[in-house]
């Protein structure tokens, strides 16, 4: 999902498609009620001048990976 977004935005934002290998265990992210937003530091997927790059992943796209019966999911939905 993230790789596709990087490829789609590569030309317009100067992103480096070859530098993305995958999501790390310590990857920075922000949780929203309807999505997961993963972000990368400057130089990770683009030049420093591009700043932090953020990519939104709607929960609908990863629903099969989410424990919707768990407390964590319930806490996100209460925001």
Image: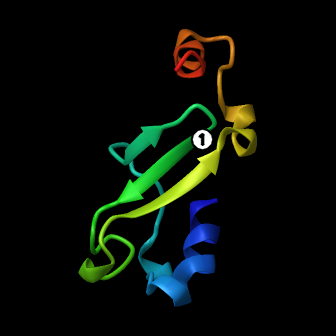
Q: In front here: 62 or 58?
A: 58
In this picture, residue 27 sits left or right of residue 7: left
Residue found at x 60% / y 11%: 70
Q: Residue at x 36, y 79 (%)?
A: 46
73, above or below 53, in the image:
above
Tell me where residue 7 appears, x and y as whole percent. Answer: 59, 78
Q: How many labels does the image show?
A: 1
Residue 24: x percent and y percent? 39, 51
- Whole-percent x, y for residue 5 in the image: 60, 69
Q: In which quarter of the image is residue 35?
A: top right
Seen at 59% across and 19% down, the residue is 73
Secondary structure beneath dot 1 equals: strand
Q: Which residue lies furthest to the front in this view?
A: 79
**Label 1, residues with CA under 10 Å away: few <14, some 14-19, many ≥20:** some
Residue 26 x/y as whole percent: 32, 44
As drawn, is 55 to the left or to the right of 4?
Answer: left
| Residue carrying label 1 | 35
Is 19 rendered above or below residue 40?
Answer: below
The N terminus lies in quadrant: bottom right
């Amino acid at each position: 999902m993230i790789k596709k977004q990087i490829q789609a935005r590569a030309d317009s934002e100067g992103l480096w498609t070859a530098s993305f290998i995958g999501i790390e265990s310590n990857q920075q992210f922000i949780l929203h009620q309807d999505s997961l937003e993963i972000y990368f530091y400057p130089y990770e997927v683009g030049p420093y001048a591009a700043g932090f790059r953020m990519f939104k992943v709607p929960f609908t796209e990863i629903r099969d990976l989410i424990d919707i019966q768990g407390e964590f999911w319930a806490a996100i939905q209460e925001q």
